[in-house]
Amino acid sequence: MNRLIFSYNNQINFIDFNEIIFIERLQNKTIIHSLNKKIETNESLTHIFEKLDQNTFFRIHRSYIVNINFIEKIVSCGQKSYKIIFKEVNEDALFSYDRYKEFKKSFIE
């Protein structure tokens, strides 16, 4: 399956994986940032991550999951601190140092 299925406000929602830019946890809500909109759900990031394609999505921080196809660049923000700049949107996401090392090992090296 190439779609994320999740519930919110007594509805079942569907979104194609290739439309999801990133997903963040913010103030007890999970926000799915897509090409066309932002969608909220109460589902945890862990639960959502289990439903995603592990070759396309990566958990970069306890508060973020990103679609690697939408990463424009990874920028150093100081010692052991990074952020991801996305294509298509004017937003960024924090990248923990340990997850950055794992990302490099999995996708770059």
Image (cartoon, helix red, strand yellow):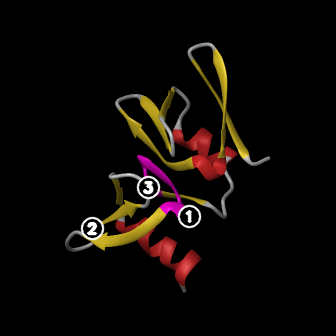
**Spatial CA span between label 3 and label 1:** 11 Å
Q: Left of 17 or right of it: where is 98? A: left
User: Residue 64 versus residue 15: which sits nearer the camera?
Assistant: 15
Q: Is residue 69 magenta?
A: yes
* Amino acid type at mark 2: Ser
- Highlighted range, magenta: 60-70
The reply to whether discs 2 and 1 touch (Cβ–Cβ < 8 Å) is no
Residue farthest right in this picture: 1
* Amino acid type at mark 3: Glu
Query: In this rendering, which labeled residue sits more in front, label 2 or label 3?
Result: 3
Q: Going from the N terminus, do you reach mark 2 or mark 1 first? A: 1
Which residue appears at 34% of the width and 30% of the height?
27
Quarter occupied by the C terminus: bottom right
Mark 3, Cα crowd under 10 Å, few <14 / some 14-19 / many 20+, is few
Q: Position of residue 75 (x, y in %)?
A: 30, 71
Q: Position of residue 59 (x, y in %)?
A: 51, 56
Q: Left of 31 or right of it: where is 57? A: right
Residue farthest left in this picture: 78
Query: In this rendering, which labeled residue sits more in front, label 2 or label 1?
Result: 1
For label 2, the residue is 81
* Amino acid type at mark 1: Asn
For label 1, the residue is 69
Q: Which mark is residue 88?
A: 3
Mark 2, Cα crowd under 10 Å, few <14 / some 14-19 / many 20+, is some
Which residue appears at 61% of the width and 39% of the height?
47
